[in-house]
Amino acid sequence: MRRALLGVPLLALAACSGATEEPLLERPAGAGAPALVVPAAAAEAAYDGVDDPALDVALNEPVEDSVYPRIGDPGVDALHYDLDLAWDPDAEVLTGRQVLLLRSTEDDDELQLDLSPELRVGSVLVDGEEVDFRHEGKDLVVVADVEADERYELALDFEGTPLPVPAPTTRGDFATNGWTTMPDGSTWTMQEPHGAYTWYAVNDHPSDKALYDIAVTVPEPFTGIANGELVDTTEADGLRTTTWHLAEPAASYLMTIATGDYVLTEDESASGVPIQYWVPRERQRLARALAPTPEGLAWLEEILGPYPFDTLGILLVDSESGMETQTMITLGMTDYTTSPAVVVHELAHHWYGDDVTPSDWRDVWMNEGMAMYLQGMWEAEQEDYTLEQLMDYWASFEDEERAAAGPPADYDPATFGESNIYYGPALMWHELRRDLGDELFLELVRAWPAEHQNATSSYDEITAWWSERSGRDLAGFFDDWLLGEVTPARG
Protein backbone atom coordinates (compact mmCIF):
# COMPACT_ATOMS: atom_id res chain seq x y z
CA MET A 1 0.00 0.00 0.00
CA ARG A 2 2.20 2.77 -1.32
CA ARG A 3 1.64 6.41 -0.59
CA ALA A 4 3.97 9.04 -2.03
CA LEU A 5 4.63 12.72 -1.43
CA LEU A 6 6.77 14.49 -4.02
CA GLY A 7 7.78 11.07 -5.30
CA VAL A 8 9.05 9.81 -1.92
CA PRO A 9 7.67 6.44 -0.74
CA LEU A 10 6.04 6.88 2.65
CA LEU A 11 5.27 3.36 3.83
CA ALA A 12 5.79 -0.29 3.27
CA LEU A 13 3.30 -2.06 5.50
CA ALA A 14 4.60 -4.90 7.62
CA ALA A 15 3.56 -7.96 7.07
CA CYS A 16 3.88 -26.72 -2.94
CA SER A 17 3.75 -30.22 -3.14
CA GLY A 18 6.25 -32.50 -1.39
CA ALA A 19 8.57 -35.16 -2.78
CA THR A 20 9.28 -38.47 -1.10
CA GLU A 21 12.89 -38.16 0.05
CA GLU A 22 13.69 -38.72 3.73
CA PRO A 23 13.92 -35.58 5.91
CA LEU A 24 17.14 -34.43 7.50
CA LEU A 25 16.32 -35.70 11.00
CA GLU A 26 15.98 -39.46 10.82
CA ARG A 27 12.37 -40.56 10.57
CA PRO A 28 11.70 -43.67 12.68
CA ALA A 29 9.75 -46.59 11.26
CA GLY A 30 6.02 -46.37 11.75
CA ALA A 31 2.95 -44.73 10.33
CA GLY A 32 2.75 -40.96 10.07
CA ALA A 33 4.36 -38.86 12.78
CA PRO A 34 7.78 -39.58 14.28
CA ALA A 35 8.27 -41.08 17.71
CA LEU A 36 9.36 -38.64 20.37
CA VAL A 37 13.13 -38.33 20.73
CA VAL A 38 14.07 -35.29 22.81
CA PRO A 39 17.74 -34.26 22.84
CA ALA A 40 19.31 -34.85 26.25
CA ALA A 41 18.73 -31.95 28.64
CA ALA A 42 17.20 -29.88 25.84
CA ALA A 43 15.32 -27.62 28.22
CA GLU A 44 18.36 -27.15 30.45
CA ALA A 45 20.57 -25.97 27.59
CA ALA A 46 19.90 -22.34 28.47
CA TYR A 47 17.92 -22.51 31.72
CA ASP A 48 18.13 -24.70 34.81
CA GLY A 49 14.70 -26.29 34.49
CA VAL A 50 11.22 -24.91 34.97
CA ASP A 51 11.97 -23.22 38.29
CA ASP A 52 14.98 -21.23 37.08
CA PRO A 53 14.41 -17.61 38.27
CA ALA A 54 15.86 -16.41 34.94
CA LEU A 55 12.56 -17.48 33.36
CA ASP A 56 10.60 -15.00 35.47
CA VAL A 57 11.17 -12.28 32.87
CA ALA A 58 8.79 -14.25 30.63
CA LEU A 59 5.94 -14.43 33.14
CA ASN A 60 2.75 -13.00 31.65
CA GLU A 61 -0.98 -12.96 32.23
CA PRO A 62 -2.24 -14.12 28.82
CA VAL A 63 -5.68 -12.97 27.70
CA GLU A 64 -8.28 -14.09 25.20
CA ASP A 65 -8.09 -11.82 22.19
CA SER A 66 -11.06 -9.53 21.56
CA VAL A 67 -10.50 -9.53 17.78
CA TYR A 68 -9.26 -13.08 17.08
CA PRO A 69 -10.44 -15.16 20.06
CA ARG A 70 -9.82 -18.54 18.42
CA ILE A 71 -6.05 -18.10 18.45
CA GLY A 72 -4.11 -18.65 21.67
CA ASP A 73 -5.27 -19.91 25.07
CA PRO A 74 -5.07 -17.80 28.26
CA GLY A 75 -4.64 -21.02 30.29
CA VAL A 76 -1.02 -21.30 29.12
CA ASP A 77 1.81 -18.92 30.01
CA ALA A 78 4.76 -20.02 27.85
CA LEU A 79 8.14 -19.26 29.40
CA HIS A 80 10.73 -20.83 27.09
CA TYR A 81 10.65 -22.62 23.74
CA ASP A 82 13.56 -24.90 22.86
CA LEU A 83 13.15 -25.72 19.15
CA ASP A 84 15.29 -28.19 17.19
CA LEU A 85 14.15 -27.86 13.57
CA ALA A 86 15.34 -29.51 10.35
CA TRP A 87 14.15 -28.51 6.89
CA ASP A 88 14.50 -30.77 3.85
CA PRO A 89 14.00 -28.49 0.82
CA ASP A 90 13.75 -31.38 -1.66
CA ALA A 91 11.06 -33.27 0.22
CA GLU A 92 9.60 -30.02 1.62
CA VAL A 93 9.42 -31.66 5.04
CA LEU A 94 9.93 -29.93 8.38
CA THR A 95 10.94 -32.11 11.32
CA GLY A 96 10.79 -30.61 14.79
CA ARG A 97 11.66 -31.54 18.33
CA GLN A 98 10.38 -29.13 20.92
CA VAL A 99 10.57 -28.59 24.67
CA LEU A 100 8.29 -25.94 26.15
CA LEU A 101 8.62 -24.69 29.70
CA LEU A 102 5.31 -23.20 30.78
CA ARG A 103 3.19 -22.01 33.66
CA SER A 104 -0.44 -23.05 33.92
CA THR A 105 -2.63 -20.07 34.80
CA GLU A 106 -5.49 -22.21 36.09
CA ASP A 107 -6.45 -25.60 37.52
CA ASP A 108 -7.37 -27.82 34.58
CA ASP A 109 -7.12 -31.34 33.19
CA GLU A 110 -5.58 -30.27 29.88
CA LEU A 111 -3.30 -27.76 28.17
CA GLN A 112 -3.97 -26.31 24.73
CA LEU A 113 -1.52 -25.00 22.14
CA ASP A 114 -1.84 -23.91 18.52
CA LEU A 115 -0.29 -26.19 15.88
CA SER A 116 -1.10 -26.59 12.20
CA PRO A 117 -2.82 -29.86 11.26
CA GLU A 118 -0.20 -30.17 8.49
CA LEU A 119 2.33 -31.09 11.20
CA ARG A 120 1.77 -34.61 12.53
CA VAL A 121 2.60 -35.05 16.21
CA GLY A 122 4.31 -38.10 17.69
CA SER A 123 4.36 -38.64 21.44
CA VAL A 124 3.81 -35.83 23.93
CA LEU A 125 5.48 -35.82 27.34
CA VAL A 126 4.67 -33.68 30.37
CA ASP A 127 7.41 -33.67 32.99
CA GLY A 128 8.93 -36.72 31.34
CA GLU A 129 5.75 -38.82 31.35
CA GLU A 130 3.96 -39.72 28.12
CA VAL A 131 0.41 -38.34 28.02
CA ASP A 132 -2.59 -38.50 25.69
CA PHE A 133 -3.34 -35.70 23.28
CA ARG A 134 -5.83 -34.63 20.61
CA HIS A 135 -4.91 -32.67 17.50
CA GLU A 136 -8.14 -31.19 16.17
CA GLY A 137 -7.64 -28.65 13.41
CA LYS A 138 -5.10 -26.17 14.75
CA ASP A 139 -5.81 -27.07 18.40
CA LEU A 140 -3.30 -29.37 20.07
CA VAL A 141 -4.95 -30.45 23.33
CA VAL A 142 -2.63 -32.18 25.81
CA VAL A 143 -4.34 -34.27 28.50
CA ALA A 144 -2.63 -33.50 31.81
CA ASP A 145 -3.75 -32.45 35.27
CA VAL A 146 -2.27 -29.02 35.93
CA GLU A 147 -2.56 -26.55 38.78
CA ALA A 148 -2.71 -22.79 38.70
CA ASP A 149 0.70 -21.08 38.89
CA GLU A 150 2.60 -24.38 38.69
CA ARG A 151 5.28 -24.85 36.04
CA TYR A 152 5.62 -27.79 33.65
CA GLU A 153 7.89 -29.15 30.92
CA LEU A 154 6.04 -30.20 27.77
CA ALA A 155 7.99 -32.09 25.09
CA LEU A 156 6.80 -33.17 21.67
CA ASP A 157 7.98 -33.78 18.14
CA PHE A 158 6.31 -33.27 14.82
CA GLU A 159 6.81 -33.67 11.10
CA GLY A 160 5.08 -32.53 7.94
CA THR A 161 4.93 -30.08 5.08
CA PRO A 162 4.11 -26.66 6.55
CA LEU A 163 1.62 -24.50 4.70
CA PRO A 164 0.76 -20.83 5.22
CA VAL A 165 -2.66 -19.85 6.50
CA PRO A 166 -5.02 -17.13 5.24
CA ALA A 167 -4.34 -13.67 6.62
CA PRO A 168 -7.34 -11.64 7.85
CA THR A 169 -6.73 -8.71 5.51
CA THR A 170 -7.73 -7.20 2.19
CA ARG A 171 -4.29 -5.72 1.58
CA GLY A 172 -2.68 -6.37 -1.77
CA ASP A 173 0.88 -7.11 -0.62
CA PHE A 174 0.14 -10.27 1.37
CA ALA A 175 -2.72 -12.75 1.68
CA THR A 176 -1.23 -15.49 3.87
CA ASN A 177 0.73 -15.79 7.10
CA GLY A 178 3.24 -18.25 8.50
CA TRP A 179 5.62 -20.66 6.81
CA THR A 180 6.16 -19.88 3.11
CA THR A 181 8.10 -22.17 0.77
CA MET A 182 9.59 -20.81 -2.45
CA PRO A 183 10.10 -22.81 -5.68
CA ASP A 184 13.80 -23.38 -4.92
CA GLY A 185 12.99 -24.85 -1.48
CA SER A 186 14.03 -21.75 0.46
CA THR A 187 11.60 -20.59 3.13
CA TRP A 188 10.61 -17.60 5.21
CA THR A 189 7.94 -16.72 7.75
CA MET A 190 5.94 -13.63 8.63
CA GLN A 191 2.96 -14.10 10.92
CA GLU A 192 1.28 -10.94 12.06
CA PRO A 193 -1.28 -11.29 13.60
CA HIS A 194 -0.88 -15.09 13.80
CA GLY A 195 0.68 -17.97 11.91
CA ALA A 196 3.61 -19.06 14.07
CA TYR A 197 1.60 -22.23 14.66
CA THR A 198 2.33 -23.23 11.06
CA TRP A 199 5.85 -24.25 12.13
CA TYR A 200 5.84 -25.06 15.87
CA ALA A 201 3.43 -25.71 18.76
CA VAL A 202 2.80 -22.33 20.37
CA ASN A 203 0.46 -20.19 22.40
CA ASP A 204 0.10 -17.90 19.40
CA HIS A 205 -0.96 -14.67 21.06
CA PRO A 206 0.91 -11.40 21.74
CA SER A 207 0.00 -11.37 25.44
CA ASP A 208 2.21 -14.43 25.98
CA LYS A 209 5.85 -13.45 25.43
CA ALA A 210 8.49 -16.15 25.89
CA LEU A 211 12.21 -16.83 25.65
CA TYR A 212 13.61 -18.91 22.78
CA ASP A 213 16.51 -21.12 21.78
CA ILE A 214 16.32 -22.37 18.18
CA ALA A 215 18.55 -24.74 16.21
CA VAL A 216 17.97 -25.01 12.46
CA THR A 217 19.50 -27.78 10.31
CA VAL A 218 19.50 -27.48 6.52
CA PRO A 219 21.56 -28.91 3.65
CA GLU A 220 24.48 -26.79 2.48
CA PRO A 221 24.69 -24.22 0.93
CA PHE A 222 21.48 -23.26 2.75
CA THR A 223 21.65 -21.50 6.12
CA GLY A 224 18.94 -21.35 8.77
CA ILE A 225 18.27 -17.89 10.19
CA ALA A 226 16.21 -17.09 13.29
CA ASN A 227 15.84 -14.45 16.00
CA GLY A 228 18.45 -13.40 18.50
CA GLU A 229 22.17 -14.04 18.65
CA LEU A 230 23.83 -16.60 16.39
CA VAL A 231 25.73 -18.57 19.02
CA ASP A 232 26.98 -21.55 17.01
CA THR A 233 27.35 -22.90 13.47
CA THR A 234 28.35 -26.49 12.74
CA GLU A 235 28.81 -28.25 9.40
CA ALA A 236 28.98 -32.01 8.93
CA ASP A 237 27.95 -34.51 6.24
CA GLY A 238 26.67 -31.77 3.98
CA LEU A 239 24.40 -30.29 6.66
CA ARG A 240 24.66 -26.91 8.35
CA THR A 241 23.18 -26.28 11.82
CA THR A 242 22.85 -22.77 13.20
CA THR A 243 21.91 -22.19 16.84
CA TRP A 244 20.19 -18.99 17.96
CA HIS A 245 19.56 -17.61 21.45
CA LEU A 246 16.96 -14.93 22.18
CA ALA A 247 17.73 -13.33 25.53
CA GLU A 248 14.55 -11.23 25.84
CA PRO A 249 10.97 -12.53 25.77
CA ALA A 250 9.17 -12.20 22.45
CA ALA A 251 5.60 -12.51 21.23
CA SER A 252 5.12 -15.39 18.81
CA TYR A 253 4.20 -13.12 15.90
CA LEU A 254 7.66 -11.56 16.25
CA MET A 255 9.49 -14.85 15.80
CA THR A 256 10.97 -15.69 12.44
CA ILE A 257 12.78 -18.42 10.60
CA ALA A 258 14.21 -18.42 7.09
CA THR A 259 16.27 -20.92 5.14
CA GLY A 260 18.15 -20.39 1.91
CA ASP A 261 21.50 -19.66 0.30
CA TYR A 262 22.32 -16.46 2.18
CA VAL A 263 25.40 -14.25 2.36
CA LEU A 264 26.13 -12.54 5.67
CA THR A 265 27.51 -9.00 5.88
CA GLU A 266 28.38 -7.65 9.32
CA ASP A 267 28.12 -4.05 10.49
CA GLU A 268 27.91 -2.10 13.75
CA SER A 269 25.97 0.91 14.95
CA ALA A 270 27.62 3.97 16.45
CA SER A 271 26.44 2.78 19.87
CA GLY A 272 28.09 -0.61 19.39
CA VAL A 273 25.08 -2.74 18.42
CA PRO A 274 26.27 -5.58 16.14
CA ILE A 275 24.25 -5.67 12.91
CA GLN A 276 23.93 -8.57 10.47
CA TYR A 277 22.59 -8.26 6.93
CA TRP A 278 21.34 -11.56 5.49
CA VAL A 279 20.94 -11.29 1.71
CA PRO A 280 20.25 -14.10 -0.78
CA ARG A 281 23.42 -14.90 -2.70
CA GLU A 282 21.94 -14.09 -6.10
CA ARG A 283 20.74 -10.68 -4.82
CA GLN A 284 23.88 -9.52 -3.02
CA ARG A 285 23.72 -6.09 -4.64
CA LEU A 286 20.72 -5.29 -2.43
CA ALA A 287 23.01 -5.25 0.60
CA ARG A 288 24.05 -1.75 -0.50
CA ALA A 289 20.53 -0.49 0.18
CA LEU A 290 20.93 -1.49 3.84
CA ALA A 291 24.02 0.64 4.45
CA PRO A 292 22.00 3.54 6.03
CA THR A 293 20.76 1.24 8.82
CA PRO A 294 23.28 2.42 11.48
CA GLU A 295 22.37 6.03 10.72
CA GLY A 296 18.65 5.31 11.10
CA LEU A 297 19.26 3.44 14.35
CA ALA A 298 21.36 6.31 15.73
CA TRP A 299 18.55 8.76 14.90
CA LEU A 300 16.00 6.63 16.75
CA GLU A 301 18.29 6.17 19.75
CA GLU A 302 18.50 9.95 20.10
CA ILE A 303 14.70 10.01 20.50
CA LEU A 304 13.85 6.69 22.14
CA GLY A 305 16.98 5.85 24.11
CA PRO A 306 19.37 2.91 23.77
CA TYR A 307 18.42 0.11 21.41
CA PRO A 308 16.55 -2.39 23.63
CA PHE A 309 18.22 -5.59 22.41
CA ASP A 310 21.74 -6.99 22.11
CA THR A 311 21.77 -7.61 18.36
CA LEU A 312 20.07 -6.42 15.19
CA GLY A 313 19.62 -8.24 11.91
CA ILE A 314 18.05 -7.46 8.55
CA LEU A 315 16.81 -10.38 6.47
CA LEU A 316 15.79 -10.03 2.82
CA VAL A 317 13.17 -12.45 1.51
CA ASP A 318 11.15 -12.92 -1.66
CA SER A 319 8.04 -11.11 -0.46
CA GLU A 320 6.11 -8.00 -1.41
CA SER A 321 5.85 -6.90 2.22
CA GLY A 322 8.04 -6.75 5.28
CA MET A 323 7.80 -6.46 9.03
CA GLU A 324 9.83 -6.21 12.19
CA THR A 325 10.58 -9.34 14.15
CA GLN A 326 12.37 -9.40 17.49
CA THR A 327 16.02 -8.33 16.98
CA MET A 328 15.41 -8.67 13.23
CA ILE A 329 13.74 -6.87 10.34
CA THR A 330 12.38 -9.01 7.53
CA LEU A 331 12.09 -7.06 4.27
CA GLY A 332 10.81 -7.92 0.82
CA MET A 333 13.45 -7.76 -1.89
CA THR A 334 12.33 -4.66 -3.74
CA ASP A 335 13.85 -1.21 -3.91
CA TYR A 336 10.67 0.02 -2.25
CA THR A 337 10.72 -2.14 0.87
CA THR A 338 14.44 -1.63 1.40
CA SER A 339 14.13 2.17 1.44
CA PRO A 340 15.67 4.01 4.42
CA ALA A 341 12.25 5.29 5.51
CA VAL A 342 10.91 1.76 5.76
CA VAL A 343 13.97 0.61 7.71
CA VAL A 344 13.43 3.46 10.20
CA HIS A 345 9.76 2.49 10.52
CA GLU A 346 10.58 -1.15 11.25
CA LEU A 347 13.42 -0.23 13.61
CA ALA A 348 11.01 1.94 15.61
CA HIS A 349 8.94 -1.18 16.26
CA HIS A 350 11.77 -2.64 18.29
CA TRP A 351 10.72 -0.18 20.99
CA TYR A 352 7.01 0.12 20.12
CA GLY A 353 5.79 -3.40 19.43
CA ASP A 354 8.71 -5.66 20.36
CA ASP A 355 9.99 -4.34 23.70
CA VAL A 356 6.44 -3.25 24.63
CA THR A 357 3.83 -5.42 22.92
CA PRO A 358 0.05 -4.95 22.77
CA SER A 359 -1.72 -7.57 24.87
CA ASP A 360 -4.70 -7.62 22.48
CA TRP A 361 -4.82 -7.26 18.71
CA ARG A 362 -7.29 -4.38 18.96
CA ASP A 363 -4.27 -2.31 20.04
CA VAL A 364 -1.96 -2.88 17.08
CA TRP A 365 -2.31 0.91 16.65
CA MET A 366 0.13 1.17 19.59
CA ASN A 367 2.80 -0.30 17.33
CA GLU A 368 1.96 1.23 14.00
CA GLY A 369 0.85 4.71 15.00
CA MET A 370 4.09 5.58 16.78
CA ALA A 371 6.32 3.89 14.18
CA MET A 372 4.47 5.79 11.46
CA TYR A 373 4.85 9.09 13.28
CA LEU A 374 8.56 8.54 13.92
CA GLN A 375 9.00 7.63 10.28
CA GLY A 376 7.29 10.90 9.39
CA MET A 377 9.57 12.87 11.70
CA TRP A 378 12.59 11.23 10.09
CA GLU A 379 11.37 11.91 6.56
CA ALA A 380 10.71 15.55 7.32
CA GLU A 381 14.35 15.92 8.34
CA GLN A 382 15.59 14.23 5.17
CA GLU A 383 13.31 15.65 2.49
CA ASP A 384 12.22 19.07 1.22
CA TYR A 385 8.86 19.11 2.98
CA THR A 386 8.00 19.87 6.58
CA LEU A 387 6.39 17.60 9.16
CA GLU A 388 3.29 19.80 9.04
CA GLN A 389 3.05 19.35 5.28
CA LEU A 390 3.37 15.62 5.67
CA MET A 391 0.65 15.54 8.36
CA ASP A 392 -1.62 17.57 6.09
CA TYR A 393 -1.02 15.07 3.32
CA TRP A 394 -1.79 12.07 5.54
CA ALA A 395 -4.92 13.82 6.83
CA SER A 396 -6.15 14.25 3.25
CA PHE A 397 -6.96 10.55 3.02
CA GLU A 398 -7.11 9.33 6.64
CA ASP A 399 -10.89 9.72 6.92
CA GLU A 400 -11.35 7.47 3.89
CA GLU A 401 -9.16 4.78 5.47
CA ARG A 402 -11.09 5.03 8.74
CA ALA A 403 -14.40 4.71 6.92
CA ALA A 404 -13.20 1.69 4.95
CA ALA A 405 -11.66 -0.38 7.75
CA GLY A 406 -13.07 1.13 10.94
CA PRO A 407 -11.57 3.14 13.80
CA PRO A 408 -7.94 2.28 14.62
CA ALA A 409 -8.81 0.51 17.89
CA ASP A 410 -12.13 -0.93 16.73
CA TYR A 411 -11.38 -2.12 13.21
CA ASP A 412 -13.12 -4.74 11.11
CA PRO A 413 -11.38 -8.09 11.93
CA ALA A 414 -11.19 -8.83 8.19
CA THR A 415 -9.05 -5.73 7.59
CA PHE A 416 -6.00 -6.37 9.74
CA GLY A 417 -2.98 -4.15 9.19
CA GLU A 418 -4.61 -1.67 6.86
CA SER A 419 -3.98 2.05 6.65
CA ASN A 420 -6.45 3.01 9.38
CA ILE A 421 -4.06 1.77 12.11
CA TYR A 422 -1.13 3.74 10.69
CA TYR A 423 -2.15 7.21 9.65
CA GLY A 424 -4.93 8.06 12.13
CA PRO A 425 -2.81 7.21 15.20
CA ALA A 426 0.18 9.04 13.68
CA LEU A 427 -1.96 12.14 13.26
CA MET A 428 -3.20 11.65 16.83
CA TRP A 429 0.35 11.67 18.20
CA HIS A 430 1.12 14.84 16.26
CA GLU A 431 -1.94 16.57 17.69
CA LEU A 432 -0.93 15.51 21.19
CA ARG A 433 2.57 16.83 20.58
CA ARG A 434 1.14 20.21 19.62
CA ASP A 435 -0.96 20.22 22.78
CA LEU A 436 1.75 19.11 25.22
CA GLY A 437 4.71 20.81 23.56
CA ASP A 438 7.80 19.20 22.12
CA GLU A 439 9.72 18.78 25.37
CA LEU A 440 7.06 16.93 27.38
CA PHE A 441 5.78 14.93 24.43
CA LEU A 442 9.20 13.61 23.42
CA GLU A 443 10.05 12.92 27.07
CA LEU A 444 7.00 10.67 27.35
CA VAL A 445 7.58 9.01 23.96
CA ARG A 446 10.96 7.94 25.32
CA ALA A 447 9.72 7.04 28.81
CA TRP A 448 6.92 4.66 27.77
CA PRO A 449 9.13 1.83 26.42
CA ALA A 450 11.84 2.48 29.02
CA GLU A 451 9.33 1.95 31.84
CA HIS A 452 7.64 -1.08 30.25
CA GLN A 453 10.57 -3.17 29.03
CA ASN A 454 9.73 -6.75 28.03
CA ALA A 455 6.07 -6.09 28.88
CA THR A 456 2.67 -6.20 27.25
CA SER A 457 0.13 -3.42 27.54
CA SER A 458 -3.51 -2.66 26.82
CA TYR A 459 -5.54 0.30 25.60
CA ASP A 460 -6.56 1.23 29.14
CA GLU A 461 -3.00 0.99 30.44
CA ILE A 462 -1.31 3.17 27.83
CA THR A 463 -4.04 5.82 27.73
CA ALA A 464 -4.13 6.06 31.55
CA TRP A 465 -0.33 6.32 31.65
CA TRP A 466 -0.30 9.23 29.21
CA SER A 467 -2.99 11.02 31.24
CA GLU A 468 -1.09 10.53 34.50
CA ARG A 469 2.32 11.47 33.17
CA SER A 470 1.13 14.48 31.18
CA GLY A 471 -1.09 15.81 33.98
CA ARG A 472 -4.04 15.95 31.56
CA ASP A 473 -7.22 13.90 31.35
CA LEU A 474 -6.67 12.46 27.88
CA ALA A 475 -9.31 9.72 27.99
CA GLY A 476 -11.69 11.57 25.69
CA PHE A 477 -8.89 12.59 23.34
CA PHE A 478 -7.74 8.99 22.86
CA ASP A 479 -11.31 7.68 22.54
CA ASP A 480 -12.14 10.22 19.85
CA TRP A 481 -9.06 9.41 17.79
CA LEU A 482 -8.96 5.65 18.30
CA LEU A 483 -12.60 4.62 18.69
CA GLY A 484 -14.46 7.36 16.80
CA GLU A 485 -16.16 6.66 13.50
CA VAL A 486 -15.18 10.14 12.28
CA THR A 487 -11.71 11.66 12.23
CA PRO A 488 -11.45 14.37 14.93
CA ALA A 489 -10.80 17.95 13.90
CA ARG A 490 -7.13 18.88 13.88
CA GLY A 491 -5.70 21.96 15.54
Image: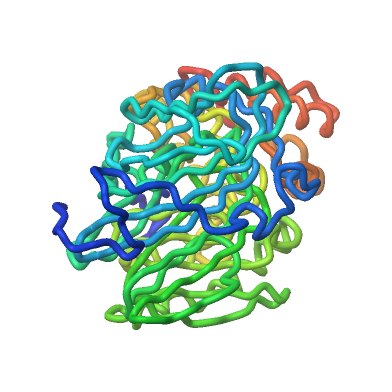
Image mark count:
0
**Compared to 318, does 278 lie above or below?**
below
Residue 370: where, in percent of width, then height? 59, 44
Image point 20% across, 60% down: which residue? 91
* Along the viewing direction, whichever of 332 and 303 lies nearer the viewer: 332
Image point 46% across, 43% down: which residue? 156
Image point 59% across, 45% down: which residue? 353
Which quarter of the rendering shows the C terminus?
top right
**Compared to 411, does 443 lie above or below?**
below
Q: How is the image coloured?
A: rainbow
| Quadrant in the rendering for residue 232 | bottom right
* Along the viewing direction, whichever of 348 and 458 lies nearer the viewer: 458
Q: Is residue 380 visible?
A: no
Image point 47% across, 58% down: which residue? 84
* Along the viewing direction, whichever of 182 and 171 lies nearer the viewer: 182
Residue 351: where, in percent of width, then height? 65, 51
Q: Is residue 123 visible?
A: yes
**Compared to 24, does 429 lie above or below?**
above
Residue 137: where, in percent of width, then height? 31, 27
Residue 226: where, in percent of width, then height? 48, 62
* Along the viewing direction, whichever of 109 and 91 lies nearer the viewer: 109
Is 303 displayed left or right of 426 in the figure?
Answer: right
**Compared to 206, does 328 lie above or below?**
below
